[in-house]
Image (cartoon, grey):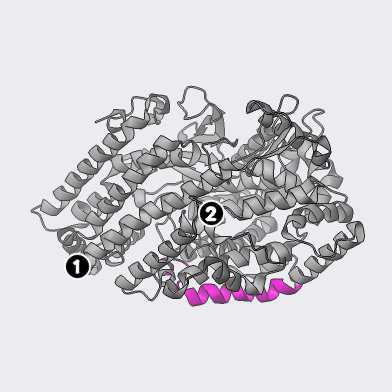
């Protein structure tokens, strides 16, 4: 038993990060698994007849300590990892996978769950209780409870191997990202780079005892270089390094891991009686079937492709007219797009960045949450964190009641994976009459302040912050009884609605005037810049849509078929990208070997959900625009039916309660400028 197995003697029961040592985790996991097994055994051995309370509810509240330790550990493995933590993850993952199987393959436990499920019509259950009962029954039926003993052994072996492969996949990508460094020693090779990016590169080089400017594959370093650096050869070098992660025929290669994961997922689905992994996954999604997903993606593709082709030809012509470029390549895309955007809209990120000081953008997100949902964010320095960069807040409602604890971690570092995500350290639930409030965190990778400048965000980073903050609000405002239905525990193609809808506020004058002030002069962002932001919002939207659709189609290509005859990852991927490809093929690059969303994270057979949720968010925001973007009545309906309900009811039912109708795809196509 370690510090992790005792009640946390901390303010608001927050995680005591500074007191936890790496060596605490393995014994803590083993102890908590043992405790959770005892809780399950108590349910099974209960001599009373199975009831909703003594079986279904007891099962949902079991393993609370294990869940808490897992959330702390795996969040650290993403945001503040090291060799030791990665090694522990490799040891712990099979234990957790086995424990999960111990539950779903426990025949006596399943008998009790089935007994309650079969008497459902006689029970007087409310909507949330009915959903919980259905979910618990399906978690057994869908995960092997009806299999023979031999098949159960096979399922356990598959799950154990998958858990280790997914971790290994992510470790390889992080190692490839950290390994690559491009040191520039001749200042003329930094031509075009904004001063802030140049200064950050110099500081990074200095921190490693090097002379010159250091460029890495971390987003705040990679993206400015690809967007502004004039040296095409260096852009090419960087682009190929970025696009070949996990595809270098070295000890960090992911090709075989991709094939193994795809085949094991297929084998698992077949074992459980499903045609493919996608059929298994989509049964529990709004989209329901792979056919529906593929039709949805292809329908959007048909509408977006003409616009994308026209935009690509315009970009090619622009690059040719400007620099005599015969054929535009992937490493030219961001560079010439930015130049063309500047020409068409007289707008570039460097003009906007002074108005988006990180602290101001954070306050802007807080102000929006206050105006919509009555929340107040009070910075607090007495809550323990896992890194000095992490900021902490008490979130309270208008009456001063605690709603949530909020952690924010914004800057890149060696032990942190790229990208942005929201996560939780403690879920919301109602237990023993107490409404336990959640501990929510968002993690991003924005440019660090330099000696001469604060952290200034690109407009794209502003929308990223609002996106993750939207997920955070979904977690913070959770108000359900049962932990497994709380917060973001919703159908995967519904989970992006709260995050994506919040991005819309970034384009509105009414919002920007609240926080977009020049970091030196305090001047509010000029109206003409707001107009340009709005006008440029659909710039290259066709190409952007095609890119997202290509990822969704690649995901379905891996998971909606029998992959046993796929031998070559690259050529298979090339075929999947066929209808969406605009740029010439780069032989050194491969998307699949670094596609962490589907091979490491939870998006397998679910990448389409970004586009699916865009339909929902465009339609929902149209409602806000009709009534006023800070309209309290609409905001309250959104909070009541979407943000607080978690997974207690079918998402389409919740959406209709909020909106009064099903979502219309036209709202998205119109917003994207793909239809008039």
**Residue 672 visible in rendering:** no
Residue lying at 38% horizontally and 76% vertically, measured from the top left: 275
Furthest toward the right, the residue is 321
The quarter of the image holding the C terminus is bottom right
Q: Say whether marks 1 and 2 touch (CB < 8 Å).
A: no
Residue 168, x across and y down, in percent: 43, 50
Please name whichever residue, 363 or 414, is drawn nearer the observer in this view of the structure. Answer: 414
Residue lying at 61% horizontally and 37% vertically, measured from the top left: 366
The quarter of the image holding the N terminus is top left
Majority secondary structure of magenta residues:
helix
- The answer to whether 632 appears left or right of 403 in the picture is right
- The answer to whether 244 appears left or right of 346 in the picture is left
- Check disc 2: other Cα within 10 Å, few if <14, some if 14-19, many if 20+: many
Q: Is mark 2 on a helix, strand or loop?
A: loop
Dot 1 or dot 2: first in sequence order is 1
Residue 150, x across and y down, in percent: 19, 67
Q: Give the range drawn in magenta.
A: 282-306
Residue lying at 41% horizontally and 61% vertically, measured from the top left: 649
**Residue 617 visible in rendering:** yes
Q: Nearer the viewer, mark 1 or mark 2?
A: 2
Please name whichever residue, 171 or 251, is drawn nearer the observer in this view of the structure. Answer: 251
Vertical arrangement, residue 192 with respect to residue 609, above or below: above
Inspect the magenta stretch and tell me whether residue 327 lies in it.
no
Label count reads 2
Residue 642, x across and y down, in percent: 50, 55
Residue at which label 1 appears: 150
Vertical arrangement, residue 278 with respect to residue 101, above or below: below
Q: Is mark 1 on a helix, strand or loop?
A: helix
Inspect the magenta stretch and tell me whether residue 296 lies in it.
yes
Cα distance between the residues tagged 1 and 2: 35 Å
Residue at which label 2 appears: 246
């Amino acid at each position: 038993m370690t510090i992790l197995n005792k009640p946390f003697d901390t303010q608001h029961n927050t995680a005591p990060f500074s007191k936890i040592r790496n060596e605490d985790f393995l014994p803590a996991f083993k102890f908590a698994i043992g405790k959770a097994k005892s809780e399950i055994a108590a349910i099974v051995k209960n001599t009373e007849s199975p009831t909703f309370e003594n079986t279904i509810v007891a099962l949902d509240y079991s393993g609370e300590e294990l869940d808490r330790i897992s959330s702390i550990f795996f969040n650290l493995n993403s945001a503040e990892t090291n060799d030791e933590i990665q090694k522990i993850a490799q040891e712990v993952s099979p234990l957790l996978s086995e424990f999960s199987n111990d539950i779903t393959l426990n025949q006596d436990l399943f008998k009790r769950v089935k007994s309650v499920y079969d008497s459902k019509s006689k029970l007087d259950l409310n909507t949330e209780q009915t959903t919980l009962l259905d979910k618990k029954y399906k978690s057994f039926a869908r995960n092997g409870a009806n299999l023979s003993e031999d098949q159960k052994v096979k399922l356990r072996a598959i799950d154990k191997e998958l858990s280790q492969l997914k971790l290994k996949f992510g470790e390889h990508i992080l190692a490839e990202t950290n390994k690559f460094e491009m040191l520039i020693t001749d200042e003329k090779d930094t031509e075009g780079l904004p001063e802030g990016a140049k200064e950050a590169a110099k500081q990074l080089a200095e921190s490693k005892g090097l002379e010159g400017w250091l460029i890495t594959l971390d987003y705040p370093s990679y993206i400015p270089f690809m967007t502004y650096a004039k040296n095409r050869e260096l852009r090419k070098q960087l682009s190929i390094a970025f696009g070949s992660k996990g595809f270098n025929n070295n000890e960090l290669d992911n090709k075989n891991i991709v094939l193994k994961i795809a085949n094991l997922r297929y084998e698992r689905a077949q074992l459980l009686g499903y045609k493919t992994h996608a059929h298994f996954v989509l049964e529990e999604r709004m989209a329901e079937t792979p056919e529906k997903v593929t039709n949805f993606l292809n329908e959007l593709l048909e509408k977006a492709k003409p616009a994308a082709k026209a935009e690509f030809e315009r970009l090619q012509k622009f690059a040719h007219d400007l620099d005599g470029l015969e054929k535009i390549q992937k490493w030219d895309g961001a560079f010439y797009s930015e130049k063309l955007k500047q020409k068409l809209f007289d707008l570039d990120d460097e003009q906007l960045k002074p108005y988006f000081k990180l602290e101001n953008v954070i306050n802007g997100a807080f102000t929006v949450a206050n105006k919509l949902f009555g929340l107040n964010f009070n910075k607090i320095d007495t809550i323990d964190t896992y890194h000095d960069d992490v900021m902490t807040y008490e979130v309270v409602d208008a009456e001063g009641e605690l709603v949530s604890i909020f952690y924010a971690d914004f800057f890149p570092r060696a032990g942190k994976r790229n990208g942005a995500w929201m996560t939780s350290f403690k879920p919301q639930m109602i237990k023993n009459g107490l409404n336990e409030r959640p501990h929510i965190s968002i993690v991003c990778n924005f440019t660090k302040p330099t000696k001469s400048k604060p952290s200034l965000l690109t407009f794209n980073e502003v929308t990223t912050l609002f996106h993750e903050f939207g997920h955070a609000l979904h977690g913070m405002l959770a108000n359900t009884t049962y932990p497994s239905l709380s917060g973001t525990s919703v159908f995967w193609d519904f989970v992006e609605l709260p995050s994506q809808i919040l991005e819309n506020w970034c384009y509105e004058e009414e919002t920007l005037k609240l926080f977009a002030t020049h970091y030196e002069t305090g001047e509010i962002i000029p109206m003409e810049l707001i107009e340009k932001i709005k006008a440029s919002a659909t710039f290259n939207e066709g190409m952007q849509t095609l890119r997202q659709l290509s990822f969704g189609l690649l995901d379905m290509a891996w998971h909606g078929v029998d992959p046993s005859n796929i031998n070559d990852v690259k050529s298979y991927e090339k075929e999947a990208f066929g209808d969406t490809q605009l740029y010439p093929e780069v032989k050194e690059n491969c998307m699949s070997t670094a596609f962490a969303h589907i091979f490491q994270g939870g998006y397998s057979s679910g990448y389409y959900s970004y586009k699916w949720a865009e339909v929902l968010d465009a339609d929902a925001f149209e409602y806000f625009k009709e009534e006023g973007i800070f309209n309290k009545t609409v905001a309250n309906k959104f909070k009541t039916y979407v943000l607080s309900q978690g997974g207690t009811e079918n998402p389409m039912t919740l959406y209709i309660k909020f909106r009064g109708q099903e979502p219309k795809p036209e709202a998205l196509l119109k917003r994207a400028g793909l239809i008039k």
